[in-house]
Image: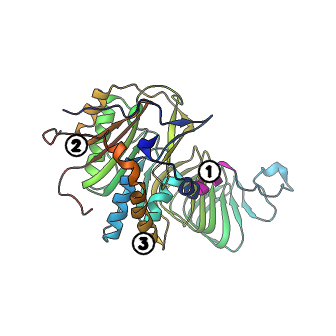
Amino acid sequence: MLFFRRRSRESSLQVTANAATVPPSKVVRGLIRFVARQIESGESCRVLVCGPPSGPTIEVFSGIGCRVTVEGERTQRVPLDYPDDTFELLLGFDQLDFLDDESARALVAEWRRVLRPGGRVYMLSRQNAGQMAAARLRVDVRTDGSLELRPSPDLADRPRKRSNRQIQTMLAPMAVDELYLRRDGLREISGKKRGSASPS
Amino acid sequence: MAMWGRKDQEDENKTSSPDAGATTSQPAAAPSAVPARGKSMDPRKAHIGPSIQIKGELIGNEDLVIEGKVEGVVRLKDHHLTIGNQASIRATLEAKAIRVEGKVLGDVVANEKVELASGSTLLGDIVSPRIVISDGARFKGSVDMENKSAPAAAKSATAAPVAAKTAAPAAQANVVRKPAGVSS
């Protein structure tokens, strides 16, 4: 059985007029450390970013030495145009909240297919339709592990509300082994694809 | 929150600098002497108007603005290339700096910078040491930033979390692990 746990009683999301900043996250730092170890060990490291494209995110991972691929389409088409076991890291920003259950499951299955065994996945999902609800969020990852969230202007859409259990069921194929929940309306979900682990 | 550790302002500034360029528009071209042909018109740049279609290889040694349709290859060594918002490009683009405001289907190679303006679409790979993506730009493809200082960056990335370890224990308490038996 998989449980979510509330992360803190106070909001860690710093919201300004048109953006929100998530303070440095242990999860994101862990991902940056993971890809850096891949590069240091001489392995290739490919990162797939699904969501509105972000220059800073690309720069962070390219700067480490990863090859970054962006799927910046509004609606992710499945199947994805990549062979099996292609990526070491997959970042899924603001995708699942805009899909119906069946489409979301299909996308998750595709994410699992293109992720290498031992590869990591990191997703953000909204817990409620609070601030910035009517637009997709562009997520900028910083080198210190913090995130900046901004509404992507031309992508107005209303995210679906899902319970923790629904999210849990939807992500079952990913074999997600770590789940975080922020109290402030943002779920942070990370996991590792099972199988023979890549060196880390 | 102690749970997340202190915010490293320096790192944030470092990474946010490219994005700063994304929100503030590039210095506009000098006011056009021919306003009827659009605000992107610059008398110092060569222009390919919206009614012009080109198929083949386009090579030049001056800055170029494309508003029309181009298929093939565009090469501007050491010069700037602007793809206007009316343009429709199915070509490989090579230049010193490339700004995309319209639609491009093809790979983009720049020695200096690639900039995707709001409302632009790029379906293809980017090779450039610097990339600026404005809010509202659409992009699908791979990015090669040709970063020759990658090993140094990797080292700093692995060192940074060590410095952040002081904040880690608090955060670790909230990790929920999935039991080994649960799978799809």
- Determine whether, in the image, residue A55 is placed left or right of residue A171: right
Q: Residues within 10 Å of mark 2 (few under 14, many from 20)?
A: some
- What main secondary structure does the magenta stretch of the protein show? helix
Indicate whether B25 appears above or below B70.
above
- Determine whether, in the image, residue A186 is placed left or right of residue B31: left
Indicate whether B177 appears above or below B34.
above
Q: Which amino acid, by three-letter code, is at mark 1?
A: Gly
Report the residue at 45% width, 71% height from top.
B152
User: Can you identify the residue that label 1 sits on?
Assistant: B102
Task: Give the magenta part as a residue range.
Answer: B16-24
Q: Which amino acid, by three-letter code, is at mark 2?
A: Ala
What secondary structure is found at the residue carrying circle 1? loop
Q: Which amino acid, by three-letter code, is at mark 3?
A: Pro
Report the residue at 29% width, 35% height from top.
A105
- The chain ID associated with circle 2 is A
Query: Where residue A188 sits in the image (x, y, percent)?
Result: 38, 39
Q: Number of labelled discs?
A: 3
The label number, if any, that marks residue A175 in the structure image: 2
Q: What's the CA distance linking mark 2 and mark 1?
A: 40 Å
User: Can you identify the residue that label 3 sits on?
Assistant: B151
Of the pair B47 and B78, the residue shown nearer to us: B78
Q: Quadrant of the C terminus of chain A?
A: bottom left
Q: Quadrant of the N terminus of chain A?
A: top left
Do callouts 2 and 3 mark residues in contact (Cβ within 8 Å)?
A: no
Indicate whether B66 appears above or below B57.
above
Q: What's the CA distance linking mark 3 and mark 1?
A: 36 Å
